[in-house]
Amino acid sequence: MTTESTTRPVPLRPTESVEPASPDVARRRSDGRPVGLLLRRSAKHALLVLGVLTTLYPVLWMVVSSLRPDGQIFGNPSLLLTTFHVENYSYGWTALGRPFGAYLLNSGVVVLGSIIGNLVSCSMAAYAFARLRFRFQRPAFAYMLVTIMLPVHVVIVPQYILWAQAGLVNSFWPLIIPKLLATDAFFIFLMVQFIRGLPRELDEAARIDGAGHGRIFFQIILPLMKPALATTVIFTFIWTWNDFFSQLIYLTDPQLYTVPIALRSFIDAQSSSSFGGMFAMSVVAIVPLVLAFALGQKYLVQGIATTGLK
């Protein structure tokens, strides 16, 4: 008996109608991104560029004013230069009776001492708060945080009396010694948060090998704190280099003047002031700050971004 296989005819599907492209799909560039998204990003970047130019305008105006005669500085707020009065730099370098490099050197001494003091004292204090267990640890840490909110103007008078009785006024020591005593609570807090993010298994493995706290700190913790240490160096450099109030209080000898006090000496209320020379030397004083930030920007961002992360 043979069975015939019948093939059923396959019904033809109706032709599907192609819908027209939506307006969002039609309004696209060749790379596939919507035009509206490109417009929003362009507007955002334009606003950011405008904000940067607004922020940098005082700096650019200072640079331009350093190349103008004194009579044209405050009468022209534009950034267009008609004459290049480069004599302001040569005059400002020697206008105070000494080369301006002497004041740069004085600021360098204070900055170097402050950086070394903060790195040594703040890192050791941060390790003690983050890894050691001692009596009154939490109250001491809270008291340290309270000092961050204490203005320097509140303690400047008793500090000045203390240094005056010690005979150290009119020297660099009142500006450097406090840094060796871990008085900058901000950097201690920064390093404490960084150390707490490091695994304690590293300390336990070092203790098994017979290492004490000194060896753990110098050989294990300290090498891992490079981002936090770099952040401390950059902020200490900027804050100390720009410090005017403390240096004005303790330094009265013109030979010990730092850069901020030397710049203030260009303005005299009783005689003629040299604004061109002051702006020229201000540009010279900004160069170390720009270089420090440019060289340490990577470590600065890394130190702030990783602080407190587990």
Image: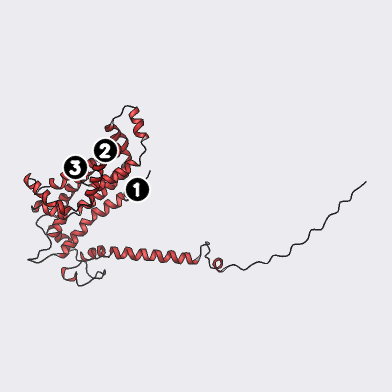
Taking 248 as reference, is 136 above or below it? above
Quadrant of residue 51 within the rendered picture: bottom left
At label 2, the amino acid type is: Ala
| N-terminal label among 2 and 1 | 2
**The furthest residue to the right:** 1
| N-terminal label among 2 and 3 | 2
Mark 2: which secondary structure?
A: helix
At label 3, the amino acid type is: Leu
Between circles 1 and 3, the one closer to the viewer is 3
**Residue 191 horizontal/vertical position (percent):** 29, 44
Quadrant of residue 228 within the rendered picture: top left
Q: CA distance from mark 2 to mark 3?
A: 16 Å
- The residue wearing badge 2 is 128
At label 1, the amino acid type is: Gln
Residue at image location 15% in from the left, 59% down from the top: 263
Residue at image location 6% in from the left, 45% down from the top: 165
- The residue wearing badge 3 is 180
**Residue 127 horizontal/vertical position (percent):** 28, 39
Residue at image location 25% in from the left, 64% down from the top: 58
Between circles 2 and 1, the one closer to the viewer is 2
* Quadrant, the C terminus: top left
Q: CA distance from mark 2 to mark 1?
A: 23 Å
Q: CA distance from mark 1 to mark 3?
A: 25 Å
- The residue wearing badge 1 is 302
